[in-house]
Image (tube, rainbow, N blue to C red):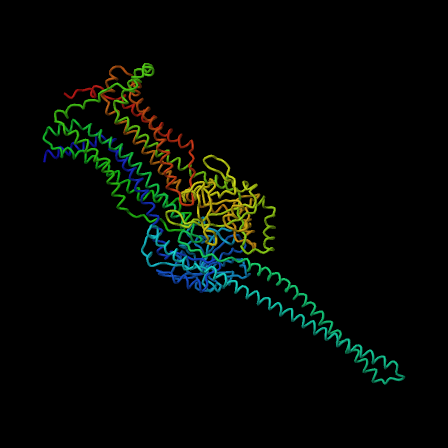
Amino acid sequence: MIKKKALWKDIFRSFKHSKGRFISILLLMMISSFALVGLKVTGPDMRETGREYFTKLNMSDVSVIGSYGLDDSDREALEKTDGIRQIEYGYLKDVTKQDSTDSFRIFSNTEDISTYKVEKGRMPKKTKEIALDAKFDDKYKLGDTITFSEKADITGSKILKNESYKIVGFVHSSEVVSSLNRGQSTAGTGELTGFGVVNKENFDSPYYMVARMTFKDTKNLDPYSKEYTNKVQAHKDAIDAQLKGQPEKRLSTIKTEFQTKINDTKRQMNDARRQISEGQQQLDAGKAQLDSARQELTIQKQQLEQAPSVPEAAKTQLAAAEQELEQKEADYQNQLNQFEAKKSDAQKKLNNSDSKIQEAQTTLNQLKQPVYSVNNRREAPGSEGYKIYNSISSIVDALANVFPVFLFLVAALVTFTTMGRFVEEERKNAGALKALGYTDRDIHKKFVVYGLSSSMIGSILGIILGHTLLPMIVYNTYQDGFDVPKITLGFHWEISLIAIALAFISAVIPALISANKELREQPADLLLPKVPASGSRILLERIPFIWNHLSFTHKVTARNLFRYKKRMLMTIFGVAGSVTLLFAGFSVQHSIEGINDRQFGELIRYDMIVAESDALTANQKDKIKEQLSDSAVEEYTSVHYETLTKVAGADKDTQEIKLIVPEKTQGFDDYIHLNERKTNKTIHLTDDGVVITERLAKLLDVKAGDTIKVKDAENKNRTMKVEGITEMYMGHFMFMNKQEYQSVFKDDFHTNASLVNLKNPSEKNTKKEAAKFIDLAGVAGVVQNTTMTSQIDVIVTSLNKIMEVLVLVAVLLAVVILYNLTNINVSERIRELSTIKVLGFYDKEVTLYIYRETMLLTAIGIVVGFGLGEWLHQFILTSVPPNDAMFNPALSSISFLVPTVIIVIVTILLGFIINRRLKNVDMLEALKSVD
């Protein structure tokens, strides 16, 4: 019992005498565990928050939208899909808030699928009631009235029965979760501002517009899992198969209905013309009767005048007849005037109707087959928020697979060295304990308890901070951009146990290995100092030209570097590890910070794309040209604009590719600069293929000369050769000239959009001018760059904040590593340093005697760190960005300068600390013999 007390007393004494070492190991394990656990749990916490929220609102697995609505035939086809759990149909319509350019999407209320979370008030129960987007609860209050204006469709009809609604509630939607980028709209400025929910009775449409579906086999699946993604994709394929023949059938139905309306209108116009003709005939007949009566009256008057005597009664009768005839003629003239007025009005209406009928017939003849969009949660209109939210969580996951692993490896190796040095320092105590009869197992307790205490305390602190601090830091970066609940902080046993296990392996296992090696010796040998590493002739000595020109101290430094090879390698690796993390951190920050300015200032130079409707009349086209000629427009060019699709990426999402084909390639660079990033050479459009953006090329794993296959707007496969790959950081684009377009699409080239540059390209003015175009009947939509820049900003801000935390962690790691390794170096060679101090070396010379080695090894470590850092940087750029984004892989001088300055400053500060320690060293105590 006494022996045990003495052993534990010795163990606790070791804590007291090596506080610096204990704290350094604790910090190393805390920093490493914090980064590992924090990054590993943040993504799952985000997804769990989303999963709970979307499950509570029963968000649809798949939504189907038909460009001409969904009729009974479409519904019948959809309902034949296998595995449906629920299906619900609804309406939606984009409108503009009155006296503003704000675009709102009005949804019909849902019963079971994609329901709404009420923030204030209630859901609408009556017509003319609306539950408004909770984003606007600071601008409106319950009971307010909001009024919208609706743009008529191609038939001139409007879908909403009412324009004004009473606000009865504020709600959150599972389908629109981004507060910044809510996607495109056909109203307002072309960008969706908000949404509202009304009862179905407010819609006047014979067809539903959207079908929301859930499936039996996805009910309890994690919506972010591969299994869920694969099952939903299988259901999408099945729905596509069910809808295969619907476009032709739907177009035929619409043409029949539309033609019937046109024919009915023509019949009504013919009836009106016939009525005009009949009225004219009646007037003509009346005029003939009046003329006949006038002639007869004239004859009677002549007869009376020729008669020798005329009775007074005859004269009175003739006067009365004349008066009656004049009255009839006056009545006739009034009828004629009224008829002519009505005829003129009717003729104007008929002429106007003729024009409208011609336009309607033109529109009908130009109608294309409808497109059925079968979308998963990340593809539906307004789903940009869902997709970006998932992208941010995936970015954190990708960093978690790289950054903390490297960090833990560096920390573990330094901890390994630190604990090994601790065992060596306790060599004499271990010999004494062994001589007193303590077993090896008893002696092991000292190192196990020391290593376990420091590593477990550090690891537990890191686990706690990792579960709380880092997720909240990430949440604070995106909370303003997403309409989702506060992040749910869960406890993750698996990664916590891994962190504890790694800490145990890093601090305890090395101590046991070193202790076993030492305890193989006899107690008498353990009581003697360990024999110093023997010197040997180094390679530099065999080069007299260099060796002979070195001073004595420099020669000593060179010999000592190779004499203590283990310490040399650990110093280089420790510094290199810190620099690697710092270099990668600053490089990633540089890669993401400038992409907005680069893409939307130097590459994409247009301010907006004005897309025309498919069925465009001559009058509508003139109106668009008139607006393009407005004084606010600097310049514009006509292009063919079309959205192509391609299923690609790990999640098998449908990637949208914007195809732009200029009418004239000359001057196209004023709107879009096509540039090969690595060579910085301008790419020109030719007849030999298409130019695609760099991120799309990487996603499809193609290079110049390869062939790709994509689907056009009519869901037909189109095959084309890739001629060039252009620099672009957000979104997928494809460019070709009109000759190549005609070759690929087997169709005549036609323009259907304009790239527009404004004289005042500010965000406010761009929205103002976009609203003017949206109001035109012939404009299908306006695409602004501000939508995409907002999306980039959310991702950049979130990733930048994460990188700031990781850079801070790397700085702390650098400080602890350099302190630890320098401290070990001094401790190992304290007798050597005391000897040269006794021999008359000044304090500064003594410090430089050992610190010159540290500075040289640090310089080597910095250079090695640059190389490893660039590898880590490129690895992060490959694995982190979402499918539709690319980070700039170019390096910045900051990436080299700042890590170097940080390491140099830390090294200099530690130099002062070491110099002070060596000044106060007890030389006699250090030089005492142990004999």
The location of residue 106, given as percent across then percent down, is 47, 58
Residue 358 lies, with reference to residue 756, above or below; the image says below
Please state, as top left, top right, bottom left or bottom right, where the C terminus lies in the image: top left
Q: Count the marks.
A: 0
The location of residue 421, given as percent across then percent down, is 22, 29
- Quick check: 455 left or right of 812? left
* Residue at x-position 33% and y-position 59%: 216
Please state, as top left, top right, bottom left or bottom right, where the N terminus lies in the image: top left
Nearest the viewer among 500 and 913 is 500
The location of residue 775, given as percent across then percent down, is 55, 54
The location of residue 335, given as percent across then percent down, is 71, 72
Q: Residue furthest right?
A: 308
* Residue at x-position 52% and y-position 55%: 96
Query: Hey, which quadrant is residue 398 in on the image?
Result: top left
Query: Hey, which quadrant is residue 415 in on the image?
Result: top left
- Quick check: 49 left or right of 837? right
Nearest the viewer among 544 and 417 is 544
Nearest the viewer among 919 and 778 is 778
Residue 523 lies, with reference to residue 100, above or below; the image says above
* Residue at x-position 49% and y-position 35%: 681
* Residue at x-position 25% and y-position 42%: 498
